[in-house]
Image (tube, rainbow, N blue to C red):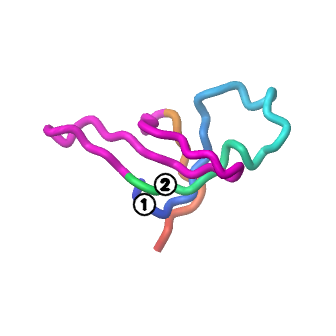
Amino acid sequence: MKVGDLVKYVGWDMKKYQNKNEHIGVIISIQRDWSGMDVRYNVQWGSGNIGTNLYHSTLELINESR
């Protein structure tokens, strides 16, 4: 995944969120640790909130940016 990709958050129970746009967003930045092995993502969600330090396993790629 890279900056600009559209992603869906899959790390919580989606049934409790009425606004489905709350769990779809765009990757706005990527952080890597000194080894480059641990990657975390910051995502701006459809609600306007920003999710920080999200693991790859909690995000599903919907559409790649070009």
Disc 1: which residue:
3
Which residues are drawn in magenta?
A: 30-57
Say few, some or many: other residues with alpha carbon within 10 Å of mark 1 (under 14 / 14 to 19 / 20 or more): some
The answer to whether the residue labelled 2 contacts the one labelled 1, judged by CB atoms less than 8 Å apart, is yes
Identified by mark 1, the residue type is Val
Indicate whether residue 45 is drawn in magenta. yes
Q: Residue at x 27, y 35 (%)?
A: 38
The vertical placement of 43 against 17, above or below, is: below
Q: Position of residue 65 (x, y in %)?
A: 49, 68
**Cα separation between marks 2 and 1:** 5 Å
Quarter of the image where one finds residue 32:
top left
* Residue situated furthest bottom in the rendering: 66
Q: Secondary structure at mark 2?
A: strand
Q: Residue at x 61, y 52 (%)?
A: 25
Q: Residue at x 14, y 38 (%)?
A: 35
Q: Residue at x 32, y 40 (%)?
A: 39
Q: Nearer the viewer, residue 5 or 28?
A: 28
Identified by mark 2, the residue type is Ile
Quarter of the image where one finds residue 33:
top left
Q: Secondary structure at mark 1?
A: loop
Q: Nearer the viewer, residue 28 or 61?
A: 28
Residue 65 lies left or right of residue 38; in this view the side is right
Residue 3 lies left or right of residue 31; in this view the side is right
Count of marks placed on residues: 2
* Residue situated furthest front in the rendering: 49
Say few, some or many: other residues with alpha carbon within 10 Å of mark 2 (under 14 / 14 to 19 / 20 or more): many
User: Upstream in the sequence, badge 2 or badge 1?
Assistant: 1
Indicate whether residue 26 is drawn in magenta. no
The vertical placement of 11 against 21, above or below, is: above
The vertical placement of 16 against 29, above or below, is: above
Disc 2: which residue:
27
Q: Position of residue 57 (x, y in %)?
A: 46, 34
